Image (cartoon, helix red, strand yellow):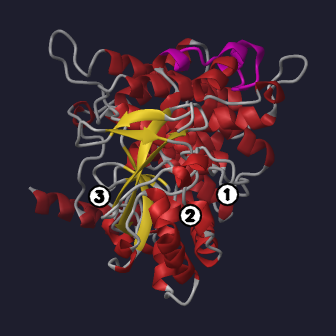
Amino acid sequence: MTAETQSAARPGTGEVAPVVSGSEQSAVGTSATSGTGKITERVSTKKGTQFDVAFELVDADDLSTSHLGNGVVNPDYPKALQPRDRTKITSEAQIREIANNLEPAWLGSSPKASDGAPIIGDDGLVESGNGRILALRLAYAQGDQGRSGQYRQWLKDNAERFGIDSAVVDGMNKPVLVRKRTTPMSDEERIRYTKEANDREQAGYSPTEQAKIDASRLTDDDIIMFAPGENGNIAAESNLDFLHRFVKSVGLEDVASLFDNNNRPNQVLVQRVQAAIFKKACDDDRLLSLMSETTDVDMKGEAARNMVAALTKAALTFARARATGSLPPKSDFISNLLEAVDLVRQSRRENQSLSEIISQGSLLESVDPITEELATFLDANLRSSQRMGEVLKDLGQQLENEAARGGADLFGSAPAGKADFISATNRNMEARGERAPFTRNEPTSQDRAGSEATEVPPLKQAVQKANRLKVDEPPVVMPDLARLLKLKQT
């Protein structure tokens, strides 16, 4: 045994087993009699996290993977352990490619946690190598006459290298070689290492996946330093300290390539920061996908850039409000804002006015009044990122203040509602000498009771819809119907 050989306690025993590198394993004699091997090795993530693993032979169907067949998400698998979106077409294609071009020797020993035999925990959860396990399942489903037959034979020929009895291979339906992690880890350490193990060169994350990971690595102290320019420009000089902190926090390599000789960030870094900030602020893949994965063909040119800049300007207040963890549901208008963005995009995509879009659809479905107010404002101000940004930032600051006070004051006052924010922003903008951005009147008693989206009877919704559609009927019909509704409800 060389000087590189280390020792590690074998799980469940007080015995010490040798930890050897992949190149030394064939030289270690064993007398394996089961699917649990006696060979261990030390592996490392790309960021340098090291831990010990032991080789085992298990049935592929006995493992818990992040996804099932055809990209279906496994509801029993912890989401935090799988940052990759295996439902994507690109991931499914990658899995098919691995299955159809299986190289057994690549699924054995490796000093990398991202390569070699998949790594599992004591609970059978696949921590690194979900794609490899899914590919092996697919290969077995295609029959032993294909690549799975070659893989099974390779397992028999090399079982003793990993301290496993070769006869065990024949006793399993879908045998796979795995490495069980033997180094204890806390839940936080486990999540961190799985993310690091998935940081591999050959299968980069989609922008959406990467934004999710980056956002999770940003702390409250990081977020508070976010300082884009007045027009929402992430590359502004005021934001340079945050950009350098972001690079350090998310562990980006080759920092020099992300800034030019004048310390200005390139577009790769700007887009990655923007996606992470939106994820942190809204935690909604609709907006994240719009901003980070698609070329917006719905709101072209200047309008699209203005929308992104305005949302960026307000993102910090949204992120800080969410970070408190005490935001009352009745106060959180972020979902309304996202729906408003969708409505404006739909209007541009279908070349129809916003009022037509809002009026269309099923008569039994109505747009939330707050959503309609926000959409109307955005639609009317798409040419001005500054105007949109100032108003959204004002709304965000109110949301942040409401979250900070925990939804109630010392006298037990009810938390402010969405309509209260709309009215307050109107007053704030008027106090600055600008016109009120929203047409909504002061909050009603129902609003203050927390019922901005009060349940409306279906028939009454139909009347409201019909009125907006300007149905070609005698003027007396709708008022009469409304009176009948009122009598019926009383």
Q: Residue lying farthest top?
A: 410
Q: Which residues are magenta?
A: 221-242
| Kind of residue at badge 1 | Arg
Examine the image and state in which quarter residue 382 appears: top right
Q: Counting residues from the N terminus, which is met first, the one under dot 3 or under dot 1?
A: 3
Quarter of the figure that contains the C terminus? bottom left
**Alpha-carbon span between mark 3 and mark 1:** 40 Å
Q: Which residue is mark 2?
A: 88
Q: Which residue is mark 3?
A: 76
Query: Picture coordinates of residue 149 (x, y %)?
Result: 52, 83
Q: Nearer the viewer, residue 142 or 463?
A: 142
Query: Picture coordinates of residue 438 (x, y %)?
Result: 51, 34
| Kind of residue at badge 3 | Asp
Q: Which residue is mark 1?
A: 348
Q: Secondary structure at mark 1?
A: helix
Q: Nearer the viewer, residue 298 or 293?
A: 293
Query: Picture coordinates of residue 469 (x, y %)?
Result: 48, 65
Q: Are marks 2 and 1 in contact (CB under 8 Å)?
A: no
How many numbered marks does the figure carry? 3
